[in-house]
Image: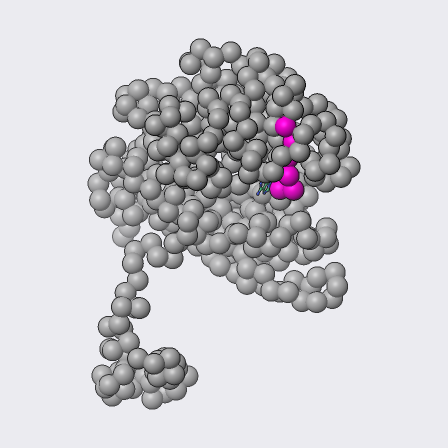
């Protein structure tokens, strides 16, 4: 069938094309529908490299559990997704079209919960994978949320403050039909923070006519944010790591640490680990990194980044490329930037004793297999970075109940939650005789599966 022919046949504005005669006749709808192009494989909507990673991990854990076929696609595929296109006026006066997404993975146990990112690679498939992992985090840490994820495809390094505000506000307005404090609650993620959450909260509140702080977490404290949220994800990584190291009988003081990413998560991990006696010997951000065997002076580096925006040019270490940093010799390698960083290409050269996944999805299944063969354990993202959503839950509870908890109370609760999560994963890993990632995901799947079975099928 030639291009021109199919364009004509698919022209729904021509009444002839909808007539029974045309549908049955040569080149009509029956023929169109019979072509292979119209056979859509299950899950095709989410197809992306990151979703493949999430799916392979899911299948592995589901196989281990012997999960019934009926529940597999129900638990794997998102319940609901919205794609929005909207115009935003740039500072230059030019109007540009942006695409945003919101994916709600499961609604089985409570509202959906998940971050909102600004990044050039945001897509439906990426959000679907990240929403699935959010479901796993919430289930593993026993929070009453399902997973969600969203974002706007853009280059955050090229946005002025005014442009970022117009984008997040319009995005919030576009997804308002499917969100709500009891339906779907947002949070910061890559390149979004308190400032964006304040604009998001204001936009939603304007739409409903009253202040609704509980529509997002990670807000400034004065708008109902919680003090401990800013450091929560990084601190949670450190608490989970401490519990793992205790079990392995490794001392944290003296461990050499390399971290990819020096944003909201990576910077907190660096400071907290150094405070506990570890030595941060390598760091990178999007513009490049540095190494220093003696340990990087984090106070000076933070001041440098606050002034210059990036690590690049910092005099307290030797320059290193951002990908080369991953193969720098160390004890703890902590990806805290973006997904698919440890792959089959570099997994053989990774020179560390443990990988700690502060970022979401930084290790591909192929790399997982190589690291396992090399006996390098991976502290998986669904547990390691779950401190963010845990403190987001505390923030939401405080907002809903109009309460305020102290920073100490929040940090203490977070530590207990992360340690309990790590203990459950270690026990499941022994019980199933499997790696930490598969054990963590099996625990999470088991919990969501139980909820889904109990709610049964509607109608
Ligand atoms: P952020 O935007 O604050 O920081 C990201 C950092 O990564 C920046 O330093 C940036 O320069 C760096 N970076 C970007 N691209 C890079 C590249 N190609 N190579 C090296 N560095 C690069 O984001 P964040 O909130 O710190 O999030 C980091 C990771 O943690 C993401 O995977 C995110 O999904 C995950 N995460 C964040 C939270 C949270 O509460 N913020 C919670 C759970 C998981």
Asked if residue 329 lies in the magenta stretch, the reply is no
Q: Is residue 287 magenta?
A: yes
Image coords of residue 431 (percent x, y): 28, 21
> How many labels sit on residues?
0
Q: Relative to residue 182, is residue 214 drawn left or right?
A: right
Residue 130 visible to an observer of this rendering:
yes
Residue 405 in the image: state x and y as whole percent: 61, 25
Left or right: residue 100 versus residue 158 is left
Taken as a whole, is the magenta stretch helix, strand or loop? strand
Q: Nearer the viewer, residue 200 or 193?
A: 193
Camera-side residue: 334 or 118?
Answer: 334
Position in image of residue 90 (x %, y %): 70, 61
Residue at the image position 61 percent from the left and 24 percent from the top: 281
The span picked out in magenta is: 286-291
* Image height of 80 relative to 140, above or below: below
Relative placement, left or right, of 297 versus 429 is right
Residue at 22% in and 35% down? 66
Note whether 335 is above or below 426 in the view shown: below
Q: Quadrant of ligand 1?
A: top right
The quarter holding residue 226 reads top right
Q: Position of residue 243 (x, y in %)?
A: 47, 17
Q: Check the image and report above or below for 249 versus 237.
A: above
Q: Residue at x 48, y 24 (%)?
A: 352
For the N terminus, the image quarter is bottom left
Residue at 25% in and 36% down: 63
Q: Quadrant of residue 47?
A: bottom left
């Amino acid at each position: 069938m030639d291009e021109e022919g199919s364009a004509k046949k698919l022209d729904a504005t021509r009444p002839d094309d909808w007539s029974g005669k045309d549908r049955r006749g040569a080149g009509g709808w029956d023929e169109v529908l019979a072509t292979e192009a119209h056979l859509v494989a299950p899950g095709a909507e989410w197809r992306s490299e990151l979703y493949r990673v999430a799916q392979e991990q899911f299948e592995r854990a589901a196989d281990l559990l012997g999960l019934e076929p009926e529940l597999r696609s129900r638990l794997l595929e998102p319940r609901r997704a919205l794609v929005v296109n909207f115009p935003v006026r740039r500072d230059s006066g030019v109007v540009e079209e942006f695409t945003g997404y919101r994916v709600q993975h499961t609604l089985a146990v409570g509202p959906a919960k998940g971050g909102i990112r600004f990044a050039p690679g945001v897509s439906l498939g990426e959000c679907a994978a990240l929403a699935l992992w959010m479901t796993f985090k919430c289930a593993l840490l026993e929070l009453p949320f399902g997973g969600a994820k969203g974002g706007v495809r853009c280059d955050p390094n090229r946005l002025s403050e005014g442009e970022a505000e117009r984008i997040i506000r319009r995005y919030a307005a576009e997804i308002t039909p499917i969100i709500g404090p009891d339906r779907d609650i947002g949070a910061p993620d890559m390149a979004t923070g308190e400032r964006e959450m304040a604009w998001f909260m204001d936009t939603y509140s304007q739409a409903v006519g009253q202040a609704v702080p509980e529509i997002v977490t990670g807000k400034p404290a004065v708008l109902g944010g919680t003090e401990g949220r800013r450091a929560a994800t990084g601190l949670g990584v450190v608490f989970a790591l401490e519990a793992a190291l205790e079990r392995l009988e490794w001392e944290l003081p003296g461990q050499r640490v390399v971290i990819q990413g020096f944003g909201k998560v990576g910077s907190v991990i660096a400071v907290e680990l150094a405070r506990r006696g570890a030595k941060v010997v390598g760091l990178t951000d999007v513009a490049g990194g540095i190494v220093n065997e003696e340990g990087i002076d984090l106070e000076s580096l933070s001041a440098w980044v606050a002034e210059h925006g990036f690590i690049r040019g910092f005099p307290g270490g030797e320059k290193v490329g951002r990908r080369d940093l991953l193969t720098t010799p160390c004890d703890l390698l902590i990806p805290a930037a973006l997904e698919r960083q440890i792959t089959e290409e570099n997994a053989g050269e990774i020179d560390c004793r443990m990988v700690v996944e502060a970022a979401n999805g930084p290790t591909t299944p192929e790399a997982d297999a190589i690291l396992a063969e090399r006996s390098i354990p991976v502290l998986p993202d669904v547990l390691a970075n779950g401190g963010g959503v845990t403190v987001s839950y505390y923030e939401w509870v405080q907002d809903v109940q109009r309460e305020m908890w102290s920073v100490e109370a929040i940090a203490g609760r977070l530590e207990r939650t992360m340690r309990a999560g790590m203990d459950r994963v270690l026990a499941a890993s022994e019980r199933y005789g499997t790696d930490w990632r598969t054990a963590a995901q099996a625990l999470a799947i088991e919990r969501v599966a139980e909820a889904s079975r109990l709610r049964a099928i509607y109608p």
